[in-house]
């Protein structure tokens, strides 16, 4: 269908998992979708630019190339993210730095390069992917929680900053609960079961449920939604 007809959408980490599901869903709705990722898409038939979001010079060069090729950028989903879990007293500098660099600095790098194009064109939608862990914390995830809380702060800031001269450039955030992707591969089965048992809906979320939320925020149906954090978590904290 046509909810994103002729829109150009960039998705970091769009080659796998939630990013690939969003890429497929956006494409079904008529968008031209580009995955910016370390590796080529395997799950979605979309355009691809190889990019490490931590490399700010390369980010600037790739975004310039994307803009040159497509002529505009309507939607940016800051989705690329990693984990490197450890209890605080066992967390190494390397674990801290890697997660901060991808999940927080990467979001900064890409949005800094993309937002001037959106502001210049006067419209755009930026969607940051946070997590329930950024809202409520989680044992063994100091680094990850800091980054996911950080992108909520960036969301509020950009919702004000990108619109300050009247541009209709919206910034919103999705905070997924525990979703059935390979990011959970390292989580023990006992913990997965307790994630299900403690959720009012008694199950994990599915990637399509995040993709549909992102589709809403990306589309013109959300034209007055700005600076919001949309929890998609089955009601896990109620
Ligand atoms: P995933 O590991 O399946 O996919 C992540 C993608 O990001 C991969 O394609 C990977 O190659 C890419 N990537 C990683 N580092 C990159 C870098 N430096 N530069 C460019 N691309 C890079 O993860 P997922 O489960 O699909 O998670 C996607 C996002 O959703 C992440 O930000 C994650 O923190 C968030 N999230 C996931 C869950 C969940 O339960 N799956 C819950 C809450 C939030």
Image (tube, rainbow, N blue to C red):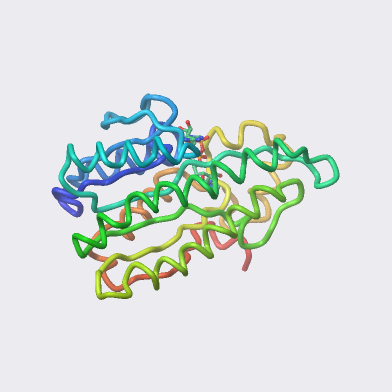
Which residue: 47% across, 41% down? 80
Q: Is residue 66 above or below residue 128?
A: above
Tally of numbered discs: 0
Of residues 203 and 29, the one drawn nearer to the viewer in this rendering: 29
Left or right: 15, with 9 as reference point: right
Percent position of residue 32, x then y: 20, 41
Determine whether, in the image, residue 35 is placed left or right of residue 197. left
Comparing 74 with 20, the one in front is: 74
Is 107 rendered above or below residue 43? below
- Where residue 77 appears, as percent x and y from the top left, is 38, 49
Image point (61%, 46%), residue name: 100
For the C terminus, the image quarter is bottom right
Q: Position of residue 40 (x, y in %)?
A: 37, 24
> Can you name the residue that lies furthest to the right here?
89
Who is closer to the viewer here, 119 or 159?
119
Residue plotted at (57% across, 36% down): 183
To which quarter of the image does residue 217 belong? bottom left
Q: Residue furthest front?
A: 57
Give the image quarter of residue 90. Answer: top right
Report x, y in % for residue 130.
52, 54
The answer to whether residue 10 is left or right of residue 204 is left
Residue at (44%, 47%) from the top-left corner? 109
């Amino acid at each position: 269908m046509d909810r994103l007809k002729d829109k150009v959408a960039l998705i970091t980490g769009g080659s796998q998992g939630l990013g690939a599901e969003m890429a497929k869903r956006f494409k079904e709705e008529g968008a031209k979708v580009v995955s910016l990722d370390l590796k080529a898409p395997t799950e979605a038939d979309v355009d691809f630019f190889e990019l490490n979001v931590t490399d700010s010079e390369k980010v600037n060069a790739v975004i310039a190339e994307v803009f040159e090729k497509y002529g505009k950028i309507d939607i940016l989903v800051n989705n690329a993210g990693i984990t490197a879990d450890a209890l605080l007293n066992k967390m190494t500098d390397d674990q801290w730095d890697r997660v901060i660099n991808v999940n927080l600095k990467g979001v900064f790098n890409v949005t800094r390069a993309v937002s001037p194009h959106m502001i210049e064109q006067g419209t755009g939608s930026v969607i940051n992917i946070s997590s329930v862990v950024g809202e409520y914390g989680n044992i063994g995830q100091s680094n990850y929680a800091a980054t996911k809380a950080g992108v909520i702060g960036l969301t509020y800031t950009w919702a004000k900053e990108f619109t300050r001269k009247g541009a209709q450039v919206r910034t919103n955030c999705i905070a997924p609960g525990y979703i059935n992707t390979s990011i959970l591969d390292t989580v023990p089965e006992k913990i997965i079961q307790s994630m299900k048992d403690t959720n009012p809906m008694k199950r994990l979320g599915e990637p399509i449920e995040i993709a549909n939320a992102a589709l809403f925020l990306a589309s013109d149906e959300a034209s007055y939604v700005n600076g919001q954090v949309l929890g998609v978590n089955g009601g896990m904290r109620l």
